[in-house]
Amino acid sequence: MKIKSDIALDFEIDCLTNSIRNVISGDSFATEISCLSTVDLKQVTPKNKWLFDWKSELNDNSKEIYKLTIVHNPMIIQGLVSLSIKTGHIFINLLESAPFNLGKNKLYEGVAGNLVAYACKVSFQHCFDGYVSFTAKTQLIEHYKKTLDAQLFGGQTMIINTFAANKLIDKYFKNA
């Protein structure tokens, strides 16, 4: 039997915004998060430059997959997150910004922060006091400490505690 290890995540927290912000105009856009559907899978393929196998994630009943879209523009997926409910916390399996939201020519910033804040919100909904964990790539551990107030738990495992979770939720979901 093959044992699947956790994937070390390498999402970039470009900035913490009040939603997502167009890097060209500076305009902020309200977002909504909803479940990824099988219809959405046509959009999030390697052919369309997405890196992860979101079909496999969606087919795994132990995971919940969410998409981030702009309010009034639900057809364009800005980013995706895969979450698992663990004992006492939410685990981020995968997080990916849309290909057009990566690199120096990205269209929107704040996508990854928005998705991490949502994971914190789900944690509170499950009475886990906002606790979220994920496995970070070694070279990004300091980045996550600085941008998310995440703490190194051991190895490459990072946690977001109640205090840090509340800060993220207040930033992204203060009107929700």
Image: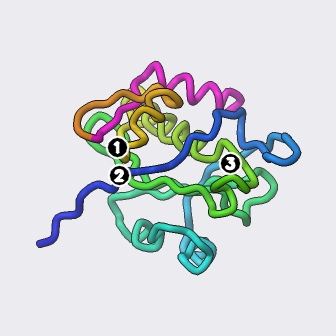
Q: Is residue 124 magenta?
A: no
Quarter of the image with the C terminus is top right
Residue drawn at (29%, 39%) of the image: 157
Q: Nearer the viewer, mark 2 or mark 3?
A: 2
What's the magenta region?
156-176
C-alpha separation, residue under disc 2 versus residue under disc 3: 26 Å
Mark 3: amino acid: Glu
Secondary structure at numbered mark 2: loop
Residue 32's disc is: 3
Mark 2: amino acid: Ala
174 vs 150, nearest the viewer: 150
Which quadrant of the figure has residue 14? Answer: top right
C-alpha separation, residue under disc 1 versus residue under disc 3: 31 Å
Secondary structure at numbered mark 1: helix
Mark 3 crowd level (few <14, some 14–19, many ≥20, 10 Å Cα): some
Quarter of the image with the N terminus is bottom left
Residue 8's disc is: 2
Q: Indicate left or right for 172 with 150 as reference.
A: right
66 vs 22, nearest the viewer: 22
161 to 68, vertically: above or below: above
